[in-house]
């Protein structure tokens, strides 16, 4: 089918909840994708911070194809070697004494965290940050600070509060004996690549203060690392830049290199509250998904992709001197002056063979595969500099 045929079929049969690029992608290799008309693009989006190993990585392709010949799905009624191994690997990488719950997306990982926080503390209220994004299911939407996304679907989960991101005193003032958990993104991805404080050093201080406040008040610190986790910032989880550990961390996106997976890692002190039947997912942690997760993480470690993320991320930031830019590793935001400029740049870049994404209406979000080379990043930045002129 050509692009026009695909678009017509999609518009007739797919629910219109997405704003799409005028492209249908047909194949990918490394950091490049090709559309149905045969045009090649450098992919600085990576399925929105998801295809950690790029496209068609041989290790991921091998793991998925070999596992698919053995078992694809078994339900969680049975033990599975891949699930047990991946749980250990993620718990070890988190630096927490923890247990893993497997699901299929970031929103689901956050739903599990909400339920566990309530059960463990016996309290009800969840506090989240201004400009947050935690997903679009009813619970995760209730702690997502986007009135536009929430309004049509009210009433949402009750007993939530939003405090200004980075304002420690406001958080302290908002915590009550009914507060079960505080949800924080150390870098807000959908929110425009923002940290709670301007510098990493100040952010580390803030995160440490929040950790201490949670300890003092018996509130659980839940870190949403759906976008920042899995090596993207140069450490496996972004909180590892801060020398703290959360009570619960949620992740998804890059954890299985593009194969759908969500994970909630729950510290041992909290996980003991959960028992059989308290939560579940038919597809969560299937042998196939976990084979993809194992291959992804093994490759990230073997090929030192966290180091690469740090190195190429620094290079991109240095090359972003034509505008305000910020980020950590390979999650980078470059400001534009308006929504219209951002859209125009996105279009211009597509014409130049580079796919970029816009977050928070006017921020260029660069979240390429972790395998990207300095040369490939240079192609993006040269084009972006020209497009900005
Ligand atoms: N949390 C964060 C920080 C995210 O960036 C996202 C998605 O962009 C989500 C949660 C929701 O993840 P999903 O779309 O997999 O449900």
Image (cartoon, rainbow, N blue to C red):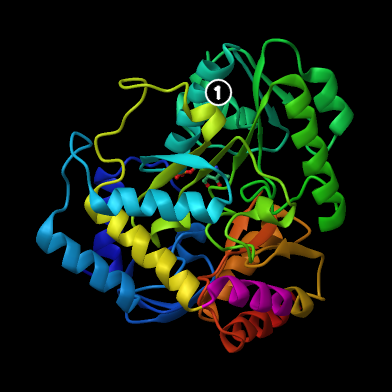
- Give me the residue at 63% from left, 32% from top: 146
Residue 169 place in picture, x, y as percent: 89, 28
Along the horizontal axis of the image, is 123 left or right of 200? Answer: left
Residue 8 place in picture, x, y as percent: 27, 55
Q: Residues within 10 Å of mark 1 (few under 14, many from 20)?
A: many
Along the horizontal axis of the image, is 241 left or right of 372? Answer: right
Q: Is mark 1 within 8 Å of ligand 1?
A: no
Q: Give the range drawn in magenta.
A: 304-316
Along the horizontal axis of the image, is 102 left or right of 240? Answer: left
Residue 198 place in picture, x, y as percent: 85, 53
Residue 368 place in picture, x, y as percent: 54, 69
Please, is residue 1 above or below residue 206 in the view? below
Q: Residue under circle 1?
A: 117
- Give me the residue at 45% from left, 61% from top: 47
Task: Determine the secondary structure under disc 1.
Answer: helix
Please, is residue 296 above or below residue 220 in the view? below
Q: In which quarter of the image is residue 64?
A: bottom left
Between 72 and 381, the one lying in front of the other is 72
Pick the quarter of the image with the N terminus: bottom left
Q: Quadrant of residue 193?
A: bottom right
Q: Is the magenta stretch mostly helix, strand or loop?
A: helix
Between 149 and 287, the one lying in front of the other is 287
Between 382 and 176, the one lying in front of the other is 176
Query: Quick check: can you spot residue 151?
Result: yes
Please, is residue 46 above or below residue 127 in the view? below
Between 258 and 341, the one lying in front of the other is 258
């Amino acid at each position: 089918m050509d692009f026009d045929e695909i678009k017509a079929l999609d518009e007739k049969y797919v629910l219109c909840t997405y704003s799409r690029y005028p492209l249908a992608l047909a194949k990918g290799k490394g950091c490049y994708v090709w559309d149905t008309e045969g045009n090649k693009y450098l992919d600085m989006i990576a399925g929105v911070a998801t295809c950690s190993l790029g496209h068609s990585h041989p290790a991921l392709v091998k793991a998925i194809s070999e596992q698919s010949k053995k078992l694809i799905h078994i339900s969680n009624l049975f033990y599975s070697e891949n699930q047990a191994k991946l749980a250990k690997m993620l718990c070890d990488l988190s630096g927490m004494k923890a247990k893993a719950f497997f699901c299929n997306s970031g929103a689901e990982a956050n739903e599990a965290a909400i339920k566990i926080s309530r059960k463990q503390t016996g309290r009800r209220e969840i506090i989240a940050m201004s400009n947050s994004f935690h997903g679009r299911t009813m619970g995760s939407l209730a702690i997502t600070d986007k009135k536009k996304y929430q309004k049509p679907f009210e009433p949402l989960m009750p007993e939530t509060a939003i405090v200004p991101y980075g304002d420690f005193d406001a958080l302290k003032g908002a915590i009550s004996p009914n507060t079960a958990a505080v949800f924080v993104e150390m870098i807000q991805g959908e929110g425009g690549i923002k940290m709670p404080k301007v510098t990493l050093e100040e952010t580390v201080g803030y995160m440490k203060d929040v950790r201490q406040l949670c300890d003092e008040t018996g509130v659980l610190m839940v870190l949403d690392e759906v976008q920042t986790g899995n090596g993207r910032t140069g450490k496996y989880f972004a909180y590892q830049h801060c020398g703290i550990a959360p009570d619960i961390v949620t992740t998804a996106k890059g954890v299985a290199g593009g194969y759908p997976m969500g994970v909630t890692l729950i510290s041992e002190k909290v996980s003991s509250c959960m028992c059989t039947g308290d939560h579940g997912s038919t597809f969560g942690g299937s042998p196939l998904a976990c084979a993809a997760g194992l291959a992804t993480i093994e490759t990230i470690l073997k090929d030192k992709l966290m180091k690469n993320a740090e190195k190429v991320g620094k290079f991109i930031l240095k090359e972003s001197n034509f505008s305000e830019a910020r980020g950590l590793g390979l999650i980078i935001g470059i400001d534009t002056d308006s929504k219209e400029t951002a859209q125009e740049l996105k279009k211009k870049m597509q014409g130049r063979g580079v796919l970029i994404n816009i977050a928070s209406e006017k921020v260029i979000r660069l979240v390429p595969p972790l395998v990207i080379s300095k040369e490939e990043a240079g192609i993006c930045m040269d084009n972006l500099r020209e497009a900005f002129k």
